[in-house]
Image (cartoon, helix red, strand yellow):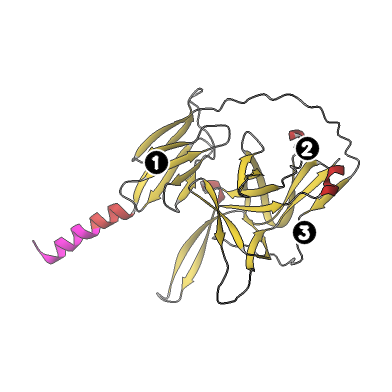
Amino acid sequence: MSTTLLWSIVICLCYQINIAQISGKVIDKTTKEGIPYVSIWIENGSNGTNAEADGKFTLLTSESKSTVIFSALGYEKKILPGSREMIVELEPTAIELSEVVVVKKYGTKQIEIGETENSLLQAYENGPRIGIKFFPYIEKYKKTKFIKQVVLNTDCRIQEAILKIHLYKVNQDGLPGEELMNKDFVVSVNKGVKRTAFNLSNFNLLMPKEGIFVGFERLKIESNKYEKSVFDANTQSNFIQTSFCPFVLCNRVERSYDYLFSEGEWRKENVLSEQKGTSKTTIYEPAINLVLTN
């Protein structure tokens, strides 16, 4: 066997391993209809994607054998071995109807919370797929206890892009816990650098006394794709860089840790630098505000 042929076989085998493709469709087990924008992750890995509006998905992985996590609000999470063609059925979760408590709304006053001392906003094209901001509860909020709006500062490079907004209760360990809404809250953002408020009035959500985590999830879907030509100084050539809109702007704040979402779970990530000898360092926190009303 010639050296050239041998290397060709090796390259082909490596190519097959390095770009293993998992694809298929996520459907509702009851209705058999596609579930839009399902979050899909490789277990024990950083790679992930989202299902399209019709439930179809494609996920590339460098692992020859991968376990895949499928997650969507209103459905039970499912963990399955990855394969070339998958039909994934998610079971709708039963919604327990709690005792209805009628709280009268007035809507005569409102406050906006979440402003930071540092108003310098920056967008990161390769930033996290899910980013969150914590809003602690303050006693004065009892006069404006309803969550009226979520406000995002975004930079959208295409005509329109969509993302998910998440609202989490606080677990006993201080991490994001159960979601306050029982189905995905998908919103659209128009082109440009702007501030957009999304109305939550119809959900009758109260500001939890333990505080609340508010987050966004950038969807890796075809309609959100943004491509641009970038010059590589090393190769002296142009290449196409792909990212997904919209980019959520961030503020620089001082913290001792950040929150990281990976494989469908939240954890605290220590960001301290021991060399600095300080208890805090600068991180980039999503520029998210909340509007509360009475």
First reached walking from the N terminus: tag 1 or tag 3: 1
Q: Nearer the viewer, mark 2 or mark 1?
A: 2
> Decide: marks 1, 3 in contact (CB < 8 A)?
no
- Asked if the magenta segment contains residue 3, the reply would be yes
- Asked if the magenta segment contains residue 189, the reply would be no
Q: Quadrant of the C terminus?
A: top right
Going by the numbered disc 1, the residue's amino acid type is Ser
Q: Residue furthest right?
A: 108
Q: Which residues are magenta?
A: 1-11
- SS of the residue at dot 2? helix
User: Which residue is identified by label 1?
Assistant: 23
Q: Nearer the viewer, residue 218 or 65?
A: 65
Q: Nearer the viewer, mark 1 or mark 3?
A: 3
> Decide: marks 2, 3 in contact (CB < 8 A)?
no
Q: Position of residue 29 (x, y in %)?
A: 48, 25
User: Which residue is identified by label 2?
Assistant: 201
Going by the numbered disc 3, the residue's amino acid type is Glu
Left or right placement of residue 41 versus residue 287 in this view: left
Residue at horizontal 28 percent and vertical 52 percent from the top: 16
Which of the 4 image quadrants contains residue 284?
Answer: bottom right
- SS of the residue at dot 3? loop
